[in-house]
Image: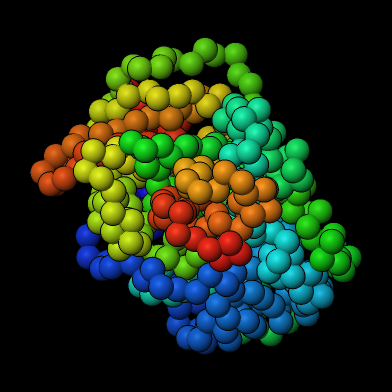
Amino acid sequence: MAKFDSDKTAKLHQELHSHLPSESALRVKALESLLVKKGLVDPRTIDAWIEAYSEEIGPKRGARIIARSWLDSDFRQRLLTDASAAIDEMGFLGNATAHLKVVENTRSTHNLVVCTLCSCYPFSILGVAPAWYKAAAYRSRAVRDPRGVLSEFGVNLESDCQINVWDSTAELRYLVIPERPAGTENFDEDELTGIVTRNSMIGTDRDLSSVRKGDI
Amino acid sequence: MDGIHDLGGKHGFGPIEVTQTEKPFNSEWEAREWGLSQCVDVPGVTIDWWRHCRELIMPEDYLLRPYLDSWAQTDLATFVDAGVISRSEALSGELEFVNEQLPPPVITTEQAIEADRKAAHRFDHTIEAEPRYQFGQTITTKLNAPEGHTRLPQYARGRKGTIHAYHGVHVFPDLSSRGIITHQHLYSVMFTATELWPEDNNTDHHIFLDLWESYLN
């Protein structure tokens, strides 16, 4: 059973620093190999999880949630009231989304999501977080200089557009609903799903009007 | 904990690498670690203890090592803390003793997808006490962090904020990181950027944090 011993754990990290190989690939290989030898994990189960997060569990799910919210105002209302229940209807509830909140972009409001303390992310609807989301540059700057961060992503907001930054400090996870672009009035759910980018659901992308179908 | 992990508002990390690929995994080892961490089970571990074990990684390793590499080290540290893996096994990679429990059954991709659906863990609860704060009320956050795990970032300590929403009662992470499960009222608190960084230019945005009642005064 876990002993919750911080001092011993800090000491272990120091020892691992000097004992483990410096290459990440070798470190992870050593961990997997040890866990397999101990009978704690089977490589085929790891394969299954990789496969699950390579295709099925990923930002296509989030994009479908957004597309449906654009087409179905009742669904959008359920999403705003209880997002976890709403995504459960679609079979997308899962790891890290039991307390999901959605925040809507409007012409005058832009939302940006970050986790400054670790890298919390709504895995079951957006999959594995992109590297920049987990990097110190984004985590440090998103709360303090969101306009600067956004301009690096090519998002230049009007000066009167209010920015709301959501720092995921608890078990709540955030999903941004981007604005539906003009010219998509005749798109069906599949077509709309195809124009929603992963970054637009985190808030580092905004205008989806130039996204080609199937770009995601 | 005033640790290296508490990055919000810090300077000096440079521009963001926005041109990275959109693939879920950038290398084979990242995929292996992701898959591994989805299926290992450390007895008694809480998400907050796991996070704290990651915060305890040496600062240079925390900043320089790739993200999923730090997950691997955190997984290893929680196994050692729980006595499932010995310290010398962790350091040498050589087997000292075999685990007594049966290995978990091999699962298929479909079963992994189903297991992920079941991993929607809830952290809410009910308690007798009424929430102390109401919507629109002004609060001041605590000034100091305890030595252990906590979720009030340094940039928002000792600052005035406004209660934006009430989220109900949630597991309190500071104690959950030590294996003690208690619950507190949780609020969404809005801060203006000018309150957090009064001397910065162009700070007209708002920052929302989810904070437990004992973080507030």
Q: Residue at x 30, y 20 (%)?
A: B138
Is A158 located above or below residue A141 in the figure?
above
Q: In which quarter of the image is the C terminus of chain B?
A: top left
The image position of residue A161, as x and y in percent, is: 28, 40
| Position in image of residue B13 (x %, y %) | 27, 66
On the image, which quarter does residue A52 sit in?
bottom right
Residue A203 locus on image (x, y percent): 43, 50
Camera-nearest residue between B137 and A85: A85
Residue at x 22% of width, y 65% of height: B12
Looking at the image, is A211 positioned above or below residue B200? below
Could one spot residue B85 in this view of the protein? yes
Q: Quadrant of residue B79?
A: bottom right
Q: Is residue B203 toward the left or the right of residue B211 in the image?
A: left
Residue A70, horizontal then vertical, whole percent: 58, 39
Q: In this view, does B8 lie to the left or right of B120?
A: left
Above or below, B83 against A100 in this view is below
